[in-house]
Image: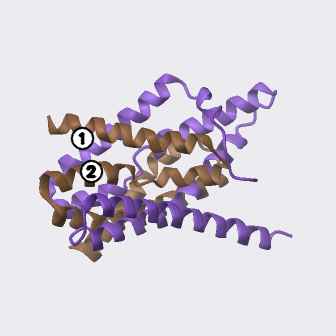
Chain colours: A purple, B brown
Amino acid sequence: MQLKVELAALKKTRWYEFALRFLFGGAVTAATGLIASHFGPVVGGLFLAVPAIFPASATLIEKHETEKKRRVGITDKRRGRKAVALDARGAAMGCIGLGAFGCVVWQLIPALNAWLVLALALGVWLSLSIVIWRLSKFFRKRGAP
Amino acid sequence: MELVFRFIVGGVVVSLFAVLGDVFKPKSFAGLFGAAPSVAIATLGLAVVAHGSAYASTESRSMVIGAVAFLIYALVCMWVMAKRPLPAALVCSAALVVWGAASFLGYFIVLR
């Protein structure tokens, strides 16, 4: 499948689903700050890579896929579960980039401009994640009969 | 007041990455945004302003361990969702225990 941007997908998301993700994201970020101020930056830092909204997003993906299939008369929920499994596979690849993001900030932020380092680390996360995703597609194609 | 500011910044950044994940196809690519450094960007930006670069650097070192734990969490979610007829909400919420266990194991082995 080719990589594409589907803006129409946003219409499927209801206002309360956007609100839910905002609340989860805000709550996790606030909680991370509280944990860091109580237990210090070493423990607090662990929570910078917490799967903050993954359960909420996975639930929405399953719901949207199941609804899509129900509209064409398919009541089987397997498709929804498969979509979540694929999303989790993508997240696993993104985690390698997330680790690289952490390494870049850890090593460079004491010496360089903090905002520049954060922008650089974001670029490293995105490019590394895309490279890993492309490589996984390439090897899956080669492995296919 | 700082907590409210944190809440708003975190909510906005996390929502932006979630929207990006919604619009990209295929699903495996969109999934990359599930592991976006959204909480990290919001928190580290505020940490630099409030505590300085050394504090942010220490947090980032721990974040690498958290990312390894997230990788294990995502693989567990992927495997269970592909193999077992269980709802995503249950699987992905229960698997947070795996993230917690892996993170704190990493903390005791590497960081402490």
Image quadrant holding the N terminus of chain B, namely top left
Left or right of residue B70: residue A7: right
Question: Which of the image's four quarters has the C terminus of chain B?
Answer: bottom left
- Residue A121 appears in the figure: yes
Q: Residue at x 48, y 39 (%)?
A: A56
Q: Secondary structure at mark 2?
A: helix
Q: Quadrant of residue A49?
A: bottom left
Give the percent coordinates (x, y) of residue A126: 50, 60
Amino acid, disc 1: Arg
Determine whether label 2 and label 1 are within 8 Å by CB.
yes
Residue located 28% across and 71% down the image: A108
Q: Residue A58 versus residue A10: which sits nearer the camera?
A: A10
Q: Is residue A19 left or right of residue A92?
A: left
Quadrant housing residue A41 = bottom left
- Would you name the residue on which mark 2 appears? B43
Q: Is residue B81 visible?
A: no
